[in-house]
Structure formats: C-alpha cells, structure tokens
Image (cartoon, coloured by chain):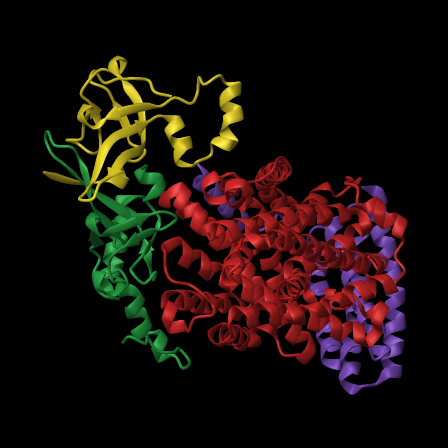
C-alpha cells in the first residue's frame, strides 16, 4: 500500500495508455461510507474545473456560445488510473475507450 | 428597533470611515491642478464601491463566509497565496501612508516632525485594537471621522460654480498634461475602490452576526453611506479647486494641503483640516491593520474576532501587532507619507484585478449565495470594474513613471 | 502569469519617476512661491499657528533652492535663466526673512517682506507664462 | 461527494465548534488492485507550502524548526473522525488534543500573555 498526497494530484496532466494527453485532474468523486472514504473516480477536463469553482452560472452562456467545444470532461473510474508515479498519472486504457460524459 | 439603530450606525460609520489620506490627497491634487474636471473619477469610483461593498456584505450575511474564506475554499491555496501576496503588500503600503497621515496631522498641530510621531501613533493604534472590541473601534473611529464633514462646509461656503461642477461629472480629457491627468484619475479610482474596504466590511458583517434578514439594510448602508462619503471626497476636490487652483498651488507636500480650508473657514479651517485628517487616517489605519490580520486569520483558518481577548485568538492578535510595528519603520526613516500615498494608490489600481476577478466568481456561486446570487445589474457593474481595473493595472504603472 | 506581471510592475515603480521637465520645475517654483505667500497671508490674519507657518516657509525656501539649482543646470527654453535665477534667489531671501520675523512675532516687518514677495510672484508668473507660450 | 470542492481547504471545527484550521491536504492510500481511499486529513505543517513549490516547503520547514512548537510535520487526523461535511468539515475530536492548535497555544503562551492586557487562555 502506498500513501500519496491527493491535493498534489490536482492540476496534474494525465496521459492515456499510448501517451496521448487526456487533460488535467480537477476533481475526485468519492463516497463517504461509515468506515472510510472511497475514491470512485477522477474527473479530468475543463468543465470539471468549472464544477469545482461552481461557476456554471457565469460560464454557461459562454459554453452555449461555443456549443460545448471547449468545456469537456472525462470521468476516469479508479481501476483505469495508474498512480505508480504520482507526478505522471497514466491511464491503463487508450483515450478512445473512455466514456465522454458531459 | 435594534435594526434601525444598526442602520443609522452603519450609515454614519461608512460616512465617517470613507475619507482617508489617499482620497483626500488625490482629490485635493485633482482640484488644485484641474479644477472641477476630475469629479467624474470620484463619481465612478463611488458607484463601483457601492456595489462592491453591498456584495461583500451580502456574501457574508448569507453564507457566513467572508470573501477571504470563500476565495481560499473555492480557488485553493496556491491561487489564494498570490492574491494574499498582492493585496496584503499594497494594503501595508496604504497603512504606512495612513500612519504617516496621522503623524503629519500632529506635525502641523504641534510643530514636531512626523518622524517622532511614528512610534507613539503606532502604539495608540495598537492599544485601540488590543483593548477595544470591534464595535468600539469601528463605530468610535468613524464617529470621530464625521469631523470630515467640515470639507463640505468649506466647499459650500466658497460658493462653487455648480454648473461647472456638474460639467465636471462628465468624463473629459484635458488639452495638455494628459499623463498627469491620467495618473491623478488612476489614483482617485485606486483611492476609492480599495480592496481592504471590501475585506473589512465583509469581516465586519460576520463580527456583527448579520444574517439574511440584514440584506435590505446592507443595501441601504452601502448605498447611502458610500454616497455621502463620495460627496465628501468631491467637497475636498471642490475646496481645492476654489482655494488652491486660482493661486497656482500644486499639492506636493502636506503643508500645502493644510491651507485648503483656510480661505473659507479661516482659523477654524486650519484646525478642522488637521483634526479631519487625524481622525480619518486613524479610522483607516485601524481598518487596514484589521483587514490584513483578518486576511491572514481567515485565509489560514485561525480563530479571529476583535471581540475576543487577544490570547483567545493569539495568532490574529500577533499579526496585527507585527503589522502596525512594521508600519512605523518607513516613517521612522523619514520617508514622505505623501509619496507613499501616491505610490500606494497607483499600486492599488494595479492589483485590483487580483481582488475583483475572484469576487465575480464568488458572487455567482449557488452554494454560497443560493437565491441571493448576483443579478445581471450587479454582475455587469463588477464586469465594468474588472474592465477598469485591467485598464488601470496596465496603464497605472507607466503613468506613474511619466505623470507621477 | 499574474505574479510575474505584478513583480515587473513593482520593479518598474521602484525606478523613481521620470525627472520633470524644466517647464514643470518652473511651474513648481511658482507653486512654492505662491504657497509661501498664502501661508504669509494666513499668518497675518492669525489663521495659522507660528510653528506651522515658520516650517512651511522654511520648506518653501528649501524647495525653491533645489528647484533653482536644477533650473540653472537645465534652463527653461525661451527664458533668460540668469534673471530668473536672481529673481528666485531674491524671493528666497524674502521668505527666509519672513520665517525669522515669524519667530520674532514682528508683523509690520513681516508685511513688508510679504508685499515684496507678492511682486516677485507676479514676475515669476510672467516667466512661467512666457515659457508656456513658447512650448 | 466531490473531494476538492467540498473538503479541501475547508474550515475544520471540533466537537465544541471551535475552529482548528483548514484542510491543507489529504492522504490517499493506493494499492495495486484495491480501491484507493482517503485515510487522513492533513492540517498545517509543510503540506500547504508543498502545494505551491517544494522549495518553499523546505524553507518553511527550516523556519518552523527554529522556533515555535518545533514541529513541522503536519497533523494527521484519521478520516473516521469526520462527522459531517457541509459548509465546514465537522470533526469528532477535541481541537487541543490533535495538535492542530500548537502554534496558537505557543504564540498565546510565549508572546501574547507576556504583553499586559493579553488575557489568559482559560483552560490552561
């Protein structure tokens, strides 16, 4: 078992299995059970950042104007993320297989 | 009943607390150099300040978080540390100018140089915070600040040309000396839209335990209080335009500004000016020291409140103690407070984006404000302020070089 | 990005302001002569305390001294710098006299010096106007 | 629940609603095949400065060793102590025992109480 500082992962670039850039880690989706706080997945991409700043009321008009081209987000389930080197998080699968959730 | 008392107190304190060395010196210089021409800058600054102060109060009343709390929680520590570096550095410069202002006021009254007043003034300001509660400091200092109404009396007594003044409310550009005109306008905006006022006001709302029912009152206090305050600044400008401009006197040193009200109120004019500056700068010095200490305490999660004994919030008390003692050092070295004032006003404009951009995000945050989020009017005003602040930030430094 | 711009901004400010042009120095000299006169008028009408008046007069005199030397080094175009300098020296003399008379509380003597300072002021004003028109 | 938006940098309050700082960092245990979990909340110490730049963290660590409570390791609070995550993060602990207030108490005892009128820390 390895211990890493979660807050240092924020903003780190994530590359997929064949080295293609996916985006930056902006948020962790977690579930808070009685015993522990389990990490479900990692949110990567600019719209995850907007979520974190809860700034959608400001950004939504811009997002509509650009018809959603700029603000994208990938939800990476915890199994697909390889955190052996916390400085360079990598995906275990190519980017194409990732579900592009909005 | 309690609310009405708080309402009147709120308006009085914002009137008394509005003027400080920055707004007086910049307004007086504008009047002495360009007559009524720069009244528009004070008007613009005051309108923006009304919205910013109202929003600061609303954020604190609804979310029980001050701007600093929310900035740290929303934007994370790295970004927050940049904002802290920029805002605290400039606020410290303004604090030095305020302590210098008190020293200069005492200098013209007693003849003893401001350098000798540096330590006693800092100790008095520190004692007020060490022993006083938030109510005593905020209300006491601002009630004393009401003496600044004498500027309005002086201005009216000199029978200003009201038409000319109204014309001055419209933005105009002078024929020559554009750089100095621009620099004075930037300094006036820097003096009125000062970030420490917002941080102090939002922390004050928490100290006074405001809640959502205070929102209408907050709007009235921000509106009336800042408007009267803005009028006082305009009165300073008009008084300078009537007394100094005809004589061709440009204000470079405090002694020149001291003669501002003498044509209108003779002997009274001199002493009223001295006491106005003394109390206005004292109120401002207290507000800035507290604002800086609040910034550190809220940002780093310490317990903070002026109503607690110093030992109950020791790091907060320790911070403002260090800040005030450091503030006295430049004055001991004899650095001219007027120079510090002008530089701090220009730098305030340069760092405005740091304070206002995050503020726009916070005021539209559904988690903090729910249905009390910004309407389109407040948002557009903040957007205008951000636009102005970026323009100021870019031109204020070169202007400082050419026009300063 | 933002912090770099802030560092650059503060470094730029630390390099003192651009030295003012000779014409501006002349305007500043006129402003200080006018300040001395206004302080004098105020003192005669017992508006301002003695200590303040003396300090303001001394401050005007020192500033005029600095401005005088600068104006000698970089003369104002279209203005005879020799006569300007002798005028400034004379008005500095009057101001110094006035400061001494304040401590001596000798109003009549003070009034005389003030009147000659007022005539100096009009001369300096003429110099400033002629420099203005030539710009 | 969203970890960064709802927990990181949030104010921490103990059983008696006394403030004890902010969440500076979060310890995540990552196993080869097991689901990662957040095990501890970090308060104070060099975690904050690590988030800006490791160099600043080294300087801060050296400074905090010179004076003060002479401890620059951050306080680790087990996640099981988290009672609720709302506007603030409420912990089921006593602030004083966790060590999060060491600096506060050190400054109070060594500096503030030495100055007249500083008042006394009651529970001392």
Q: Count the marks: how many?
A: 0
Q: Position of residue A47 (x, y in %)?
A: 40, 27
Q: In front here: B122 or B258? A: B122
Chain letter, colour red: B
Q: Is residue B85 visible?
A: no
Looking at the image, which residue is at 70% across and 64% down? C63
Q: Give left or right: position of C26 versus A33.
A: right
Q: Is residue C111 visible?
A: yes
C18 above or below D107?
Answer: above
Please identify the residue farthest to the top as the structure is shown: A96
Q: Position of residue B312 (x, y in %)?
A: 37, 70
Identify the image quadrant of the N terminus of chain B: bottom right
Q: In front here: B361 or B95? A: B361
Question: Which tint was used for chain A?
Answer: yellow
Q: Give left or right: position of A101 versus C116.
A: left
Q: Give left or right: position of B130 versus D69.
A: right
B373 above or below B286?
Answer: above
Chain letter, colour green: D
Q: Position of residue B58 (x, y in %)?
A: 56, 50
Snapshot quadrant of residue B2: bottom right
Q: In front here: B353 or B113? A: B353
Question: Which tint was used for chain C?
Answer: purple
Q: In front here: B194 or D41? A: D41
B237 above or below B355?
Answer: below
Q: Position of residue A16 (x, y in %)?
A: 23, 19
């Amino acid at each position: 078992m390895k211990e890493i500082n979660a807050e240092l992962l924020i903003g780190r670039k994530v590359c997929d299995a064949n080295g293609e850039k996916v985006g930056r880690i902006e948020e962790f989706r977690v579930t808070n059970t009685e015993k522990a706080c389990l990490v479900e997945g990692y949110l990567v991409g600019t719209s995850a950042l907007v979520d974190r700043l809860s700034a959608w009321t400001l950004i939504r008009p811009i997002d509509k104007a650009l018809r959603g081209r700029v603000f994208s987000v990938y939800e990476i389930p915890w199994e697909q993320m390889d955190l052996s080197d916390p400085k360079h998080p990598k995906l275990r699968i190519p980017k194409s297989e990732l579900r592009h959730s909005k | 009943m309690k609310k009405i008392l708080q309402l009147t107190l709120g308006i009085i304190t914002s009137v008394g607390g509005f003027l400080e060395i920055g707004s007086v010196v910049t307004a007086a210089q504008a009047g002495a150099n360009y007559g009524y021409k720069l009244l528009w800058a004070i008007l613009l600054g005051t309108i923006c300040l009304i919205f910013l102060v109202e929003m600061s109060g609303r954020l604190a009343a609804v979310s029980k978080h001050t701007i600093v709390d929310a900035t740290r929680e929303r934007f994370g520590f790295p970004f927050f540390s940049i904002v802290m570096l920029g805002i605290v550095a400039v606020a410290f410069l303004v604090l030095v100018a305020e302590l210098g202002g008190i020293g200069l006021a005492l200098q013209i009254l007693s003849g003893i140089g401001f350098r000798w007043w540096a330590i006693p003034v800092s100790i008095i300001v520190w004692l007020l915070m060490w022993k006083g509660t938030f109510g005593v400091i905020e209300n006491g200092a601002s009630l004393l600040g009401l003496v600044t109404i004498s500027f309005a009396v002086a201005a009216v007594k000199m029978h200003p040309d009201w038409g000319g003044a109204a014309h001055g409310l419209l933005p105009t550009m002078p024929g020559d000396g554009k750089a100095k005109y621009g620099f004075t306008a930037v300094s006036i905006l820097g003096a009125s839209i000062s970030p420490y006022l917002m941080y102090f006001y939002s922390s004050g709302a928490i100290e006074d335990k405001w809640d959502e029912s205070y929102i209408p009152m907050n709007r009235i206090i921000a509106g009336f209080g800042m408007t009267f305050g803005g009028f006082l600044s305009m009165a300073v400008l008009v008084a300078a335009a009537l007394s100094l401009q005809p004589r061709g006197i440009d204000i470079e040193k405090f002694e020149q500004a001291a003669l501002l009200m003498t044509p209108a109120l003779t002997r009274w004019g001199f002493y009223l000016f001295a006491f106005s500056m003394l109390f206005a700068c004292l109120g401002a010095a207290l507000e800035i020291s507290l604002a800086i200490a609040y910034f550190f305490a809220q940002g780093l999660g310490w317990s903070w409140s002026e109503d607690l004994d110093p030992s109950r919030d020791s790091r907060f008390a320790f911070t403002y103690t260090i800040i005030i003692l450091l503030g006295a050092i430049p004055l001991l070295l004899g650095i001219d407070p007027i120079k510090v004032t002008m530089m701090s006003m220009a730098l305030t404009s340069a760092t405005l984006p740091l304070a206002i951009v995050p503020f726009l995000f916070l005021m539209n945050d559904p988690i903090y404000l729910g249905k009390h989020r910004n309407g389109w009017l407040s948002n557009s005003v903040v957007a205008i302020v951000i636009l102005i602040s970026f323009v100021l930030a870019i031109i204020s430094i070169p202007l400082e070089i050419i026009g300063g | 990005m933002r912090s770099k711009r802030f560092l650059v901004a503060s470094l730029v400010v630390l390099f003192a302001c651009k030295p003012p042009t000779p014409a501006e120095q002349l305007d500043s000299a006129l402003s200080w002569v006018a300040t001395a006169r206004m302080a004098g008028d105020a003192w005669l009408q017992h508006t301002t305390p003695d200590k303040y008046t003396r300090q303001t007069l001394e401050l005007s005199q020192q500033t005029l001294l600095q401005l005088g030397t600068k104006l000698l080094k970089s003369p104002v175009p279209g203005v005879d710098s020799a006569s300007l300098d002798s005028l400034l020296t004379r008005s500095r003399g009057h101001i110094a006299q006035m400061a001494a008379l304040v401590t001596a509380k000798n109003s009549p003597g003070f009034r005389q010096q003030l009147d000659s300072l007022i005539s100096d002021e009009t001369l300096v004003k003429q110099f400033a106007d002629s420099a203005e028109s030539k710009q | 629940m969203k970890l960064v938006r709802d927990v990181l940098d949030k104010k921490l309050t103990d059983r008696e609603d006394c403030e004890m700082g902010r969440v500076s960092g979060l310890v995540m245990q990552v196993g080869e095949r097991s689901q990662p979990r957040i095990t501890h909340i970090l308060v104070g110490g060099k975690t904050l400065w690590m988030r800006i730049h490791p160099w600043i963290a080294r300087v801060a660590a050296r400074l905090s060793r010179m004076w003060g409570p002479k401890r620059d390791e951050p306080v680790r609070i087990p996640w099981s102590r988290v009672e609720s995550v709302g506007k603030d993060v409420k912990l089921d602990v006593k602030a004083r025992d966790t060590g999060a207030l060491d600096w506060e108490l050190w400054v109070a005892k060594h500096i503030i109480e030495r100055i007249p009128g500083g008042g006394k820390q009651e529970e001392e």
